[in-house]
């Protein structure tokens, strides 16, 4: 006579199989992960050898002494304004950075490989440590992956700029929220205070908004907008430039105009509402027509236009509290833009006035 399993025996078998699965799965995944890491290390060695060959070949036809090159998604290098083709018998990386000494030898590298052999999948994201210590490639990768728990609003990081604004500056995280309750992601709402936003802690240079004493066209047509999205943007580290996303910027209009301005920018100045919420005595929204089209940044949460509650908006230039520009046109004038005074309170100046410049930008969501 054949005898089957009892219900209790079947349940016992299921429980045993479940336990085996729980134990085996992480082991198998760990083996796969280690195999990928080992493969990437081999590919990295082959790739760096190919980079050395590419630099040597380039120097046969012209003088080529790169200081820093960015690894593009196809594995080729972008060195300043020129590209370098890297031929390698293996899988190419999808992002990263390589630096060289004056003799063209590699001094440091950050090489990131993708999960898919064809490079179409998301890159393997390096483990984040802190905003202060992580390089820009690591920060950008983790922001894109949504892995930002170790990065907190108010965290600071030093940054080296080149060119006209050459020097060492400090940037800080001023926003991480991207809540539709606050209207982020809705039509007609500025993206400038939504998602992962970084601003310069202090003023990096002094500049006028326009060379002519007018605010016609507001932020959209201002010379300041052109200046920070060209001169200042190009001064940023190349790996950071590649990680800054296009941002929809809504800004207020000037006297005799009738419609807010919408631009797409890499860098932008902040606006009134992004710093302050209205207090009991002063209505900043009366003169900024785009006040309701944005929200207060997380870092400035609770800062108001009431007396004594706005000092958090103060910024220094070379160690001294200094007026700095906002992007908001002053509605009742044909020449004014908002600015923040030395106490962190709002006022306005005519466009030809020289005030501080302290841009903000967003990283991949």
Image (cartoon, rainbow, N blue to C red):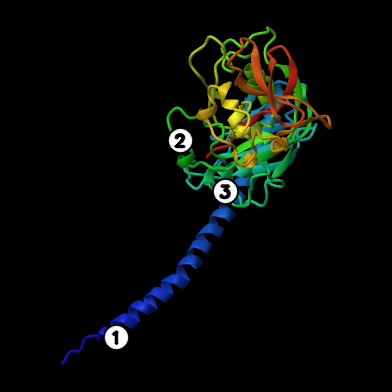
Q: Does the residue at mark 1 contact the one at mark 2 (Cβ under 8 Å)?
A: no
> What's the CA distance linking mark 1 and mark 2?
54 Å
Which disc is residue 8 wearing? 1
Residue 199, given in percent of the width and then of the height, sits at: 66, 34
Numbered disc in front, either 1 or 2:
2
Residue 21, given in percent of the width and then of the height, sits at: 42, 71
Q: Is residue 47 visible?
A: no
Q: Is residue 121 visible?
A: yes
Mark 1 and mark 2 lie on one chain; the one further toward the N terminus is 1
The reply, left or right, for residue 201 in relation to residue 120 is right
Which residue does the image show at 64% across and 36% down from the upper left? Answer: 304
> What's the CA distance linking mark 1 and mark 3?
45 Å
Mark 3 and mark 2 lie on one chain; the one further toward the N terminus is 3
The residue furthest front is 281
Where residue 269 sits, quadrant-wise, is top right
Residue 71, given in percent of the width and then of the height, sits at: 61, 35
Which residue does the image show at 29% across and 81% down from the upper left? Answer: 10
The residue furthest right is 319
Mark 1 and mark 3 lie on one chain; the one further toward the N terminus is 1
Q: Which residue is mark 2?
A: 185
Mark 2 surroundings: few (<14), some (14-19) or many (≥20) residues within 10 A: some
Residue 260, given in percent of the width and then of the height, sits at: 50, 19
Mark 1 surroundings: few (<14), some (14-19) or many (≥20) residues within 10 A: few
As displayed, is residue 74 above or below residue 153? above
Which residue does the image show at 71% across and 46% down from the upper left? Answer: 132
Where residue 186 sits, quadrant-wise, is top left
* Quarter the N terminus occupies: bottom left
Q: Secondary structure at mark 1?
A: helix
Return the residue nearer the eye: 193 or 128: 193
Q: Which residue is mark 3?
A: 125
């Amino acid at each position: 006579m054949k005898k089957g399993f009892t219900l209790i025996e079947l349940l016992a078998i299921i429980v045993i199989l479940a336990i085996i699965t729980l134990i085996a799965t992480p082991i198998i995944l760990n083996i796969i992960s280690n195999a990928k890491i080992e493969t990437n290390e081999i590919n990295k060695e082959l790739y760096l050898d190919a980079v050395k060959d590419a630099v040597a070949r380039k120097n046969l036809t012209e003088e080529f002494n790169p200081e820093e090159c960015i690894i593009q998604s196809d594995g080729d290098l972008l060195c300043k304004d020129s590209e370098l083709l890297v031929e390698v018998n293996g899988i190419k990386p999808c992002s990263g950075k390589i630096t060289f000494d004056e003799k063209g030898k590699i001094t440091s590298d950050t090489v990131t490989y993708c999960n898919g052999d064809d490079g179409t999948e998301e890159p393997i994201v390096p483990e984040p440590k802190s905003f202060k210590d992580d390089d820009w490639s690591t920060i950008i990768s983790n922001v894109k992956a949504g892995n930002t728990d170790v990065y907190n609003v108010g965290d600071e990081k030093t940054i080296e700029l080149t060119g006209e604004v050459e020097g060492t500056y400090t940037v800080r995280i001023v926003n991480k929220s991207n809540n539709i309750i606050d209207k982020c992601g809705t039509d007609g709402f500025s993206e400038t205070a939504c998602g992962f936003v970084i601003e310069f802690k202090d003023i990096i240079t002094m500049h006028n908004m326009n060379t002519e004493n007018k605010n016609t066209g507001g932020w959209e047509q201002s010379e300041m907008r052109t200046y920070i999205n060209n001169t200042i943007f190009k001064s940023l580290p190349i790996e950071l430039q590649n990680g800054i996303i296009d941002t929809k910027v809504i800004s207020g209009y000037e006297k005799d105009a009738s419609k807010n301005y919408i631009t797409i920018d890499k860098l932008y100045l902040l606006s009134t509402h992004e710093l302050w919420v209205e207090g009991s005595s002063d209505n900043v929204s009366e003169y900024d027509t785009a006040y309701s089209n944005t929200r207060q940044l997380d870092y400035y949460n609770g800062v108001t236009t009431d007396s004594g509650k706005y000092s958090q908006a103060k910024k220094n230039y070379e160690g001294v509290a200094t007026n700095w520009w906002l992007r908001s046109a002053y509605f009742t004038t044909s020449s004014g833009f908002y600015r923040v005074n030395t106490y962190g309170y709002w006022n306005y100046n005519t466009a030809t006035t020289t005030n501080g410049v302290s841009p903000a930008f967003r990283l991949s969501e």
